[in-house]
Amino acid sequence: MGTVDGESEPMGTSRTRGRAARPRQGASMADVARLAGVSSQTVSRVSNGFAGVTEDTRRQVLDAMRELGYRPNSAARALRRGEFRTLGVITFSLSTMGNIRTLEAIATSAAQHGYAVTLLPVAVPTQDEVNGAFSRLGELAVDAVIVIMEIHLLDAATVSLPPGVQVVVADSDAGDRYTVVDTDQAGGARDAVRHLLDLGHQTVWHLAGPEGSFAAQRRANAWRDTLAAAGRVPPPLVRGDWSAESGYRAGLRLADEPDCTAVFTANDQMALGLLRALHERGLRVPGDISVIGFDDIPESASFLPPLTTIHQDFAEVGRLCVEGVLSKMRQDGAEHGTTLVPTRVVVRESTGSPPGR
């Protein structure tokens, strides 16, 4: 006998033969099993991606799911498995190129491992906001957390992590409190300064990022140390805020410095503004002043002139963050450590020998 209004039919028959089933609200696994002519256990195996189901049977079950509008109960499945297959990402800024590209890489890598990503943005970079983001983790179905923010906001005395949630921090200096994945900020800055010194410049000015940034601090310290190691006196540091507008303002100031023949900018966006200011002041790049950036954003090759810069591998940072946090999940209690992703100099047309050489 067939079924009438949801009554059971003998195993092995299927309502998909001859006519399509009418989609229903709240379809259950048992409904899918009846429509596909299989057992509920087989439906469960297909839903969970387990082996041991022939391709024809799998296709029949998936067709039945689509006809009925059935969606597996991921929350119940997570409770049975003890995991949600979701990673939380906490970040306080989606306006910087580095954070956006790192987040993109994390989402891509997570998907390759079968994980989804839940974003927890922090509106204002304050301790209360960070605490609130971590508190919300207890209400969300996440297995682990990747944090993209400065470590001074992760005060171990005030931040409380949900039990069993592993954490990896990107772009920070967490010491031995967290596992860290970061670009080799200091190494990249050293290479930038050495590139300009090797071209014959007597010293290198620096347009730094904001004071609260770990990356800006690392790059500025390496700039100063590299000049000192070469026996050069560091000029006064000029401060920006990562934006092209702050680079433009700094460029107007540096254009009035008669001894300025080379500038290392802490990111490419500020270098863009700097180039505009120098152009407006009638200074040639690199004929009068050489400029090197940091990031190697896709647009940097289209600046006028094309920008020499330090390449950051954001995709690798994101991949290592995901692999690091998944490794910590598999090995609960694993020791913390820091992984630095190498940088490289990308030489284009904005750097050259100083005037007169």
Image (cartoon, rainbow, N blue to C red):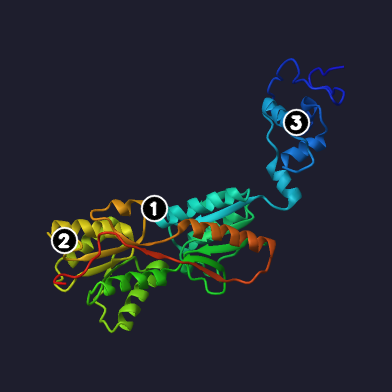
**Residue drawn 33% across the image and 62% down it:** 309
Q: Amino acid at mark 3?
A: Asp
Tell me which amino acid carries mark 2: Arg
Compared to residue 14, the image places residue 115 above or below, namely: below
Vertical order, 64 against 348 (above or below): above
Name the residue type under label 1: Ser
Q: Residues within 10 Å of mark 2 (few under 14, many from 20)?
A: some
Element marked by disc 3: helix
Residue 56's tag is 3
- Residue 355 horizontal/vertical position (percent): 15, 70
Circle 2 — which element?
loop
Mark 1 vs mark 3, foreground winner is 3
**Mark 3 surroundings within 10 Å by alpha-carbon count, few (fewer than 14), some (14 through 19), many (20 or more):** few
**Residue underneath mark 2:** 284
- Quick one: 109 or 98, which is closer to the camera? 109
Assess whether mark 3 and mark 1 are in contact (beta carbons under 8 angstroms): no
Q: How far apart are labels 2 and 1 at the CA level? A: 30 Å
From what the image shows, is residue 344 above or below residue 91? below
